[in-house]
Amino acid sequence: MIAIEIPGRGRLEFRHLVLDLNGTLATDGLVPAEVLDRLRELARALNVHVVTADTFGTAASLEASGIRVTRLGPGDQVAAKAAAVRDLGATSTVAIGNGMNDEGMLREAALGILIIGQEGAAVRSLLAADLVVTSIQDGLDLLRFPKRLLASLRTA
């Protein structure tokens, strides 16, 4: 678990991390080694889940690294990703994504982080997020070093 007290927002206790794959963890389907290292580190404190349509067919490499992967079939992926967050417990979940289909999970989670990376980010998802960063490394580091959240989230 990762816990932090945010002035004006209260105590946040995170038990789960839900991530999109393509455009968030991966660029052109490839997940950098330093991102996998950060995920493994965070997996000591959080249950890490990747929820993806697996556009590039590369999710198996994450599973081989011991990361839980849920592949989404055709249908309403916005609703499916939001339901995944609710099923885990939205008040104890951080969600990280970038695409249009990440909007629901970013809105549902106790903390939604949008990545604006090389594949861009959907404006609807940006408006649903609590924070915006320009790399997955920075997004994951907010959880590795949770005091970084204070400057952006505090209201008091």
Image (spheres, helix red, strand yellow):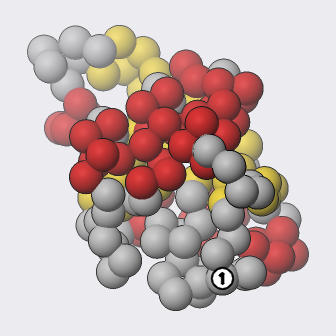
Residue at 59 percent of width and 86 percent of height: 30
Which residue is under mark 1? 56
The percent position of residue 89, horizontal first and vertical second, equals 66, 22
> From what the image shows, is residue 68 above or below residue 143?
below
Return the residue nearer the eye: 75 or 126.
75
Quadrant containing the N terminus in the rendered view: top right
Return the residue nearer the eye: 41 or 77.
77
Left or right: 38 as drawn, with respect to 142: right
The percent position of residue 63, horizontal first and vertical second, equals 83, 69
Quadrant containing the C terminus in the rendered view: top left
The percent position of residue 7, horizontal first and vertical second, equals 24, 17
The crowd level at tag 1 (other Cα within 10 Å; few <14, some 14-19, many 20+) is few
Residue at 73 percent of width and 43 percent of height: 47
> From what the image shows, is residue 51 above or below residue 9?
below
Left or right: 54 as drawn, with respect to 38: right
Type of amino acid under label 1: Phe
Residue 2 visible within the image: no
> From what the image shows, is residue 114 above or below residue 54?
above
For residue 61, what is the image quadrant?
Answer: bottom right
> From what the image shows, is residue 111 above or below residue 44?
above
Left or right: 84 as drawn, with respect to 147: right
